[in-house]
Structures are given as structure tokens and as C-alpha cells.
Amino acid sequence: MTTEQKHIPVLLSSVLAALGDIQGKTIIDCTFGAGGYTRAFLSRGASVIAFDRDPNVLSDVEHIAAKYGDKFRFVPKTFSHISEIDGPVDAIVFDLGISSMQIDVPERGFSFRSDALLDMRMSVSGMTAAELINNSDVNTLAQILRDYGDVNRAGVLARALKENQPKTTFELRKLIHNIKDVAPVFQALRIAVNDEMGELQRALSAVPDLLSCGGKCICVTFHSLEDRIVKNKFREWTTPLGDPRMPILQPAPFSLIKTALPDADELSDNTRARSAHMRGVIKSC
Ligand SMILES: C[S@@+](CC[C@H](N)C(=O)[O-])C[C@H]1O[C@@H](n2cnc3c(N)ncnc32)[C@H](O)[C@@H]1O
């Protein structure tokens, strides 16, 4: 079974509608995953440069490379490395967060529903969540829990983490007395382990210079923290340039594309689509 059968692409039809005709265009897919978006772009005549930090995606990469040859290139790096691509490109697409393959494989340590080592690394290298707890002081841990999980009584939990040094998902779960808080704590540690917010900020900073005139940037987000980063960047790019007190302003470098949410059919087919939100911008000429 390839990973294509395990991950249902979220908001794909909205992303394709926002991109319009992509025949002959070059698209950067920043989050290859199971290649759902990449396959859709290639089958509509685009060339794709895809990024993913997870080495487990390589079997899908090989399938696609065999079928599409030099129309497809894969970069096994974090997407903040898009700044190293020779532009311009016609579109840059982000489908953020983790894939079903990552959350559904217990040994990856992302899920509180099965017992495994507390890992949570998308790239399978660097510091695990257990090591992050081990190496951080109480204040840093409390900040992570507060900033990335909006966790109540973050200081108390941070102290409990340091005292108990959980090594597995179930050991961590046991320390979180209020079961309602389990998901936000796991989310906070996952975001910190993978530097998800830093990656997104750095990648978005590279977008304006990389896009061609009329080029588009489309982001699908899954929680309010990443959505806020995207919304603020897009607001900055779509604001006319110059001093707002002066009568003549230069037009904004980008304009907004209509946002999209999953419809009832998508929500009933795919629970992962629940909190998805698509935003896009188009570069002015
Ligand atoms: C939601 S999945 C993408 C699914 C894909 N659109 C599809 O249709 O199959 C997100 C993927 O992005 C990857 N990813 C997340 N953050 C990344 C980053 N900063 N750099 C590179 N890959 C990243 C994850 O490893 C995961 O495979």
C-alpha cells in the first residue's frame, strides 16, 4: 500500500480552483506528504518542486518520479529552504500540519491514543519530545505549553514534566490530570519539537521574491496559531505601500484570493478536514 491510500488531501478542490489553469506552470508544493496535491498538479500539466522533511515519504516520491520524470523534483528538506530555489515560480502551496501517516503510526509518538516513545519528530532527526522536556528548564517548558497549546496552569504542568521526565506518550498522558488538556499539550510539544511556527515564518518571508508576476501563494492551515501567522503576512502584503496619511499610496504588492473552508461532504468524508482553512494571495504585476 502506498501512503497515497492513507492520507486524504484536504481542501484539494478549493486549492485547485484558487490556482486556476496550471498547465505549463511551475508550482512549489512545500508539504509533499502522500503526494496528493503534487499528483493533482502534475496530472493537470504543471511541473512540481516538492519539499518534505519526513524521509518516510520517499516511496511515494519514487512512484511519482518514475511517472513524471523531469516535471517533478523532490527536495528532502524543511520548507524554509524554498529560499534556495531559483525562481520565479508560478505558485507556492502549503498544506500545513502533520499527515495521517504521521499521526496514525503509533511509533512516531504523535498520538496520545497509543503508547510509544515520546518522539514527535517529522524529520526523524534532531531532538525528540522526551529530549526537549529533558533539556529545557521549567520556564521554557511553561512558555511552550502556554504559547503553542494555550494550556491552563502551564507552570504546574511544566514542573511535573521536569520532575517526572516522561519517556512515552502514556507516561505524558498520565501526568496531565485533566483529560481535556491532553490534545493541547501534545500539540504544544509537537509544534516546539518541529519548530513549526519558525519554519512557517521563514518560508513565508521567501515567498514574495520567489513568485512571478501573477503568481499565487496558497496556505491550508489547521489551527489558529499557524492561521494567524498566514493571515498577518497576507494582510501585510495586501496593504498599499507608503504613508497612509499621504494622498498617494503605491498599490499593494499582492491581493487576496477568496478563502475557503471544507464543505459538509468533505467534513463527513474526512475528519482531518475539521479545522482546515484555505487562504491565498496573488502577486500584482
Ligand atoms: C498535511 S501533510 C501534506 C499532505 C499533502 N498535501 C497530500 O495531499 O498528501 C503535511 C506534510 O508536510 C510535512 N511538513 C510539515 N512541516 C514541514 C516543514 N517545515 N518542512 C518540510 N515538510 C514539512 C510533513 O512532514 C507532512 O508530510
Image (cartoon, rainbow, N blue to C red):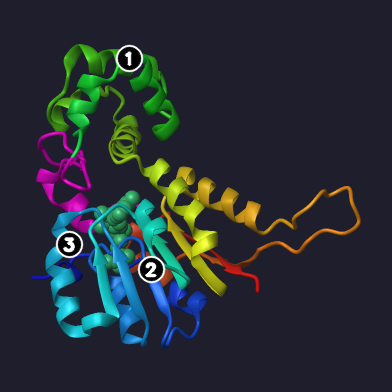
Placement of 279 over or under 160, stated as above or below: below
Q: Please name whichever residue, 68 or 39, is drawn nearer the observer in this view of the structure.
A: 68
Q: Residue furthest right?
A: 247
Image position of 237 (left or right of 220): right
Which of pointers 3 and 1 lies earlier in the amino acid sequence? 3
Q: Position of residue 93 (x, y in %)?
A: 42, 65
Which one is closest to the eye, mark 3 or mark 2?
A: 2
- Rendering quadrant holding ligand 1: bottom left
Marks 3/1 in contact by CB < 8 Å: the verdict is no
Q: Which mark is residue 28?
A: 2
Numbered range of the magenta stretch = 97-125
Is 115 a magenta residue?
A: yes
Disc 3 to disc 1, C-alpha distance: 35 Å
Q: Quadrant of residue 258?
A: bottom right
Magenta region includes residue 53: no
Residue found 16% across the figure and 40% down from its top:
109
Circle nearer the N terminus (2, 1): 2
In the rendered image, residue 15, in percent from the top left (x then y), is placed at: 45, 72
Secondary-structure class at tag 2: strand
Counting from the top left corner in percent of width and height, residue 3 is at 16, 66
Q: Is mark 3 within 8 Å of ligand 1?
A: yes
Q: Quadrant of the C terminus?
A: bottom right
Label 3 sits on a secondary structure element that is helix
Q: Is residue 134 above or below residue 79?
A: above
Mark 3 is on which residue type?
A: Val
Classified by dominant secondary structure, the portion drawn in magenta counts as loop
